[in-house]
Amino acid sequence: MNSIVCLKQVPDTEAQLRVKTDEIVTEGVKFVISPYDEFGIEEALLQKEKAGAGEVNLVCLGPQRCVEAIRTGLAMGADKATHLDDPAFDGSDALATAQALAEQIKKMEYDLIFCGRQAIDDDQAQVGGALAEYLGIPHASLVTKVEVAADKKSVKVNRQIVGGEEILEIPMPCVLTCQKGLNEPRYASLPGIMKAKKKPLTPVKAADIGIDAGTVGAAGSKTKGGNFTSPAARTAAKIITGESPEEKAANLAKALREEAKAI
């Protein structure tokens, strides 16, 4: 079972981000694997273990600092990785990113491609679907369970929908975007960390995959970043008082109506 996991490096959820008018300040920020991508790595490893054969290959697009996240994925158990690292890719939006990933993946062998349901920095949830479209293969989003058929020609997946769950059978190869609940990602062990240092990590430039630099990066992106602003500081909470529950309820309703203008 050969799987590809598309990995993105994002700021840690606990990082204190600062913004300028036209950019997010990254100096001093800790970066990690996007959590939903970790579900993809774990599922790829589980499917390889069930099959008893195959490879798990990570593919990441981003600057040089992404090597740390890639090595973490390798330490979890992935076999090798490809890093699309070229200034030509800088500023790529979701579609430009998907196009670059697709051109690289076309050169690789795979049965399944796993992506996170979304990256936690921009929350767009577009790369997985766009990647499947560029590759001309089916895809399912918000996947919470994966069962590969015995003949390795199709996969049955459970996916989250509003108010319930949907079960689909999809021909392979395909793209699956992973939702929380699919599995519990393993931690990288010390032996895994040591082995990761020797696992293949191939850097790739735009020219290596034959892609026109004008179709990726900021030049090829249809989505442009506007102004960046920090959220407004939270105001202090107001404590609703009263001698009885009824009085407190009345005071709450009065505050919502007269002060907050919410009712």
Image: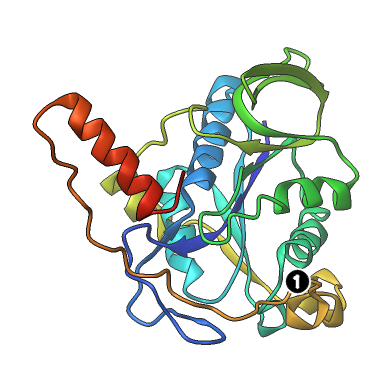
Q: Position of residue 129 (x, y in %)?
A: 77, 46
Q: Nearer the viewer, residue 248 or 53?
A: 248
Q: Position of residue 158 (x, y in %)?
A: 65, 20
Q: Is residue 175 left or right of residue 33?
A: right
Q: Residue at x 17, y 47 (%)?
A: 239
Q: Residue at x 33, y 54 (%)?
A: 194
Location of the N terminus (image quadrant): top right
Residue 218 occupies quadrant: bottom right
Q: Is residue 152 visible?
A: no
Q: Three-letter amino acid code at disc 1?
A: Thr
Of all residues, the one furthest to the right in this rendering is 136
Q: Position of residue 200 (x, y in %)?
A: 55, 59
The residue carrying pointer 1 sits among few (fewer than 14), some (14 to 19) or many (20 or more) residues within 10 Å by Cα, namely few
Q: Nearer the viewer, residue 21 or 182?
A: 21
On screen, 91 above or below 180?
below
What residue is disc 1 on? 223
Q: Nearer the viewer, residue 21 or 236?
A: 236
Q: Is residue 77 left or right of residue 213?
A: left
Q: Is residue 256 left or right of residue 139?
A: left
Of all residues, the one furthest to the top in this rendering is 150
Q: Residue at x 34, y 39 (%)?
A: 253
Q: Is residue 179 left or right of residue 198?
A: right
Q: Is residue 205 visible?
A: yes
Q: Residue at x 40, y 60 (%)?
A: 197
On screen, 117 above or below 213?
above
Q: Nearer the viewer, residue 5 or 141?
A: 141
Local secondary structure at mark 1: loop
Q: Position of residue 263 (x, y in %)?
A: 46, 43
On screen, 110 above or below 89?
above
Q: How is the image coloured?
A: rainbow
